[in-house]
Structure formats: structure tokens, C-alpha cells
Image (cartoon, rainbow, N blue to C red):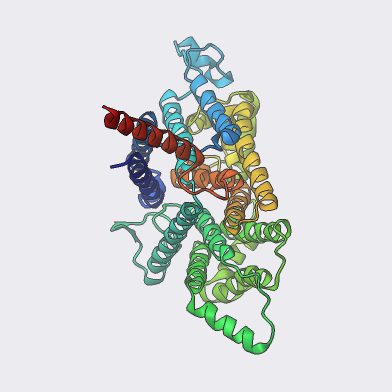
Amino acid sequence: MSIQTTSKHAHQFLFYNLLGIIIYLPLPFGSHRLLAWSIVELWIFGLFTVWAFLCLQHKSSLPSYWKKCWFPLVSLIGFACVGLFQLMPLNLSPKPISVLNDLGWTQYSFDPNATVEHLLKTTSYICLFILTIALVNTEQRIKTVLKVFFFCGVFQAGYGALMTLTGIEQIFWIPKEHYIGRATGTFVNRNHFANYLSMCAAAGTALLLIDLSRRKVKGWKNIFISLLNFIMSRKMLFRIGLALIVVGIVLSRSRMGNTAFFISLVSAGFLWMILTRRVSRNAIILLTSLIIIDLWVVGNWFGFEEVQARIQNTSASTETRDEVIRDTLVYIKDNPTLGTGGGSYYSVYSYYKSPDVNGFYNYTHNDYLQFVSEYGIVGISFIALFVLSSFFTAVMSMIKRKNSTMQAASFVSIMVITALLLHSLVDFNLQIMANAASATILLTLAWIARHLPSNQAIHDSMDREKHQKSEKRIRKTKHQHKTV
């Protein structure tokens, strides 16, 4: 078997495993259980180890443009270093931990075990970023990743809608304990479910944008023929699937989930039309139909008015998140630089919890405050650099690249970032592994779309060079044997 064939099979094996991770992530309660996220971490670390071994054997490698993706990688590594620093035996503990230091507490983190868990998750996201850069290295593979996310979203939406409409509230034969009568798919929390569907909807919309025709259709006859072609094409299946995903988002009754989805769709769609200079009738009809038809028709059939009522009836008297945020701000004020340790919020918050706050809070219900409280200003700065640089790269890809697939992949990253920035104001989606890992992959697409060579014949130019060198060595060896 030639080196080229071996390299091809190795890449296929790794890529299919990456797709398997994408499919698995949302299934076991959004991978928000110890066993579930441990399986994901072992899978990612194992896949990364195999890839690294193949690189040493010259059967795989990073693409030639990987050096242009150094900034987001350094940002993620910097965030991981903050978590690692929190496990060091340092006497720099923040205010509420000073008492524990007197008792012999030697580590910066208030909860070292939780910080280790978070550090492992962060490391798995770094490996996932590198694997995505290395394996999603052709235009066809970008489309495949988008299709897998889209079909995962269709399954989640269909599963959630089926449970809600039939009244059989079970997640894989396990009775639901929370959000009865609300669509959650295989997630426990409807807000995390809605956010995941928003990411999948972004992938589905991108698939439609890739095949969007620029040809102007004139005359009623041609318009009718074009409509029939659309109905009979695979694009109609994508459109039906998108409608089902929106049904799932609406049935979740998530206020910010619905709000973030529609705002991110409008803003990303507007940017796509302006930056790619594709302000055509087909583009306007597609994006408008995604908003109007889904908002009014699907909403009226499946109860969008209940979501609207929840938004209108929201008040400070019925919500305790405001008090939690108030207490968390005091918490942050005492530990502003490096926080109290990854995963330590649920332990430290008890020191700051006011008497008017009832119940137990594992999370802040605000990702911004969650990261600042646990990792400080330094930690959230690294996350901000990763997200903002990915957004800027996606914008530049839309402007510079002429390939519709690259432009659509950039659309996905922008829509995902916008939805996350909005939803993170009132929830903790990035603390859920299915959402955080999926977001990592979809944001990485922005960097691939920006730097992937247009004329890539085999996996990447580095593979091509190594293949040529290997063939030269083989020919030289054969020539020596003939001479002998």
C-alpha cells in the first residue's frame, strides 16, 4: 500500500471519529454528566494521540496554513494556563479563602478537584480545535461537518417536539424531572437545548446559502419552474429540516433562546448579504422566509405566543437571577484578577449569598460573570480574544473569499457567536460540554474558511510535499536495485 493511500485512510479514520464526537455530544444529557463528559474527553484525547502518532509517522500533519491560526490557539492555551496556575501551591488566595489558608490550604483554587475537571475540559477543547484545523481541510469536509450538525439539530428538535406533543416525557426511557411540557431534546435544560438548536440552524442555513443561485429568473413561467425545481431538490429537505428546528426552539419556550436565534439569524444574514455582495432577490427571499414564515406560521401552530407571554410577564419579583448577579458582583470585586478557581463558583457563592435568595445555585446564569468569578479578568480576556478574533476572521473571510462554501462557513461562525453572546447574558451554555465543544468546532470553521487554499487537490500542501519526497525516495531505491 502506497504512502498516499495510507495517509488517506488514516485521515478518513480520524475525520469519521471527529464526526462521531459531534453526533455523540448532545445525546447523553448534553454531555453534562461526569460519565458523559469523561467519555468525550477520553475520545478527544485518544483521537488527538492517534493523530499525533500518525504525524510522527508522516502519515498525517497539520495543514500548511496552520501557522495563520496561531492566535486563537494561543488564546485557548492562555486560558488553560490560568486554570493550571490556580492549581499551583501559592499563597495568593482571594479574600474568602484566607481562612482556609490558616488551616493549611495551599492551593489558589477554592475547589481544586473542580478546577482539575475544568482544566481537562479546556484541554479537550484545545485538542478539538487542533483536530478540526487538521482534519476539516477540504471544502467537501466543511460541508460534511455542517450536514452532521444540521441533522443532529433535526433529530434533537424532532425528539423534543415528539416528547412534548405526545406527553411521553422521557430522555432515553429516563423520566424527565424538569421542564415538563417543554421541549428539551436529550438535554436537561430547555435553554441549553434552544442554544444548541440555534447552532444547528446556523449550519442548516449555511447549506442553503452554499447552493443559492445567483441567476436572475424573469417571467412567471420561469419563476414557477424555478419554484418546482426548488421543491424537488435537496434544498427543500434542508428547508423542512430548518422549520423543524425552529419548531423545537419555539417549543422549548426559552425566552432568550428564541430571541437570540432570530437576532443572530437577522444580523448574520444581513452581514452575509452586504459583505459577500450577494444582495439578490433569491438571498432576500431565503432569509426573509426563514424569519417571517417560521416566526408567524410555525409560531402560531406551536405556541409562540406562550414565549411572548413569558417575556412580557418577566418581572423582578418572580426572578431571583438579579439578586444572584448582585451577589456575584460583590464576589468578583473581592477576587477580580484570577477568580477563585475553575468550577469553584457553587462553593464560593455560599459566602456571598444574600438571605433573599432562595435555592441552590451551581452557576451564575450569566456566562460572563461565571468566567470572571472563576477565572478573573485575566481568564475571560483570553476567551474574549478567541471569540472576537474568530468573529473578525469570519468577517474577513466573507469579504476576501469568493467561494460560496467558505462564505457560508463564515456565516455559521458569525451566527453562532452572536447567539452565544446574547444568550450568555442570562444563562450558562458554555458550561455545558455539548454546547461549548460544538461552538469550538463551529468557530474554528471561520479560520479554516479564511485560510484554506482554494486549489487544494489532496489533503493539504504539506501532505503533497511529503508525498512527492516519498515518491522520489521510492524511485531512487528502485533505481539502485536495478543498478545492482
Whether residue 295 is situated above or below residue 105 in the rendered picture = below
Q: Residue 361: horizontal and vertical position, in percent?
A: 50, 40
Name which residue lies at 42% across and 27% down.
Answer: 116
Name the foreground residue: 181 vs 20.
20
Quadrant where the N terminus sits is top left
Q: How many marks?
A: 0
Whether residue 353 is situated above or below residue 152 in the rendered picture = above
Name which residue lies at 28% across and 32% down.
Answer: 482
Quadrant where the C terminus sits is top left
In the drawing, does residue 463 fall left or right of residue 276? left
Whether residue 70 is situated above or below residue 195 in the rendered picture = above
Name the foreground residue: 10 vs 199.
10
Q: Residue 101: horizontal and vertical position, in percent?
A: 49, 12
Q: Looking at the image, can residue 351 be seen?
A: no
Name the foreground residue: 427 vs 280.
280
Pick out the residue farthest to the bottom: 221
Name which residue lies at 51% across and 79% down.
Answer: 231
Name which residue lies at 57% across and 41% down.
Answer: 367
In the drawing, does residue 433 fall left or right of residue 475? right
Pick out the residue farthest to the front: 483
Q: Residue 61: horizontal and vertical position, in percent?
A: 44, 35
Whether residue 186 is situated above or below residue 306 in the rendered picture = above
Q: Looking at the image, can residue 370 be seen?
A: yes
Name the foreground residue: 10 vs 260.
10
In the drawing, does residue 384 fall left or right of residue 6? right
Q: Residue 127: horizontal and vertical position, in percent?
A: 45, 35
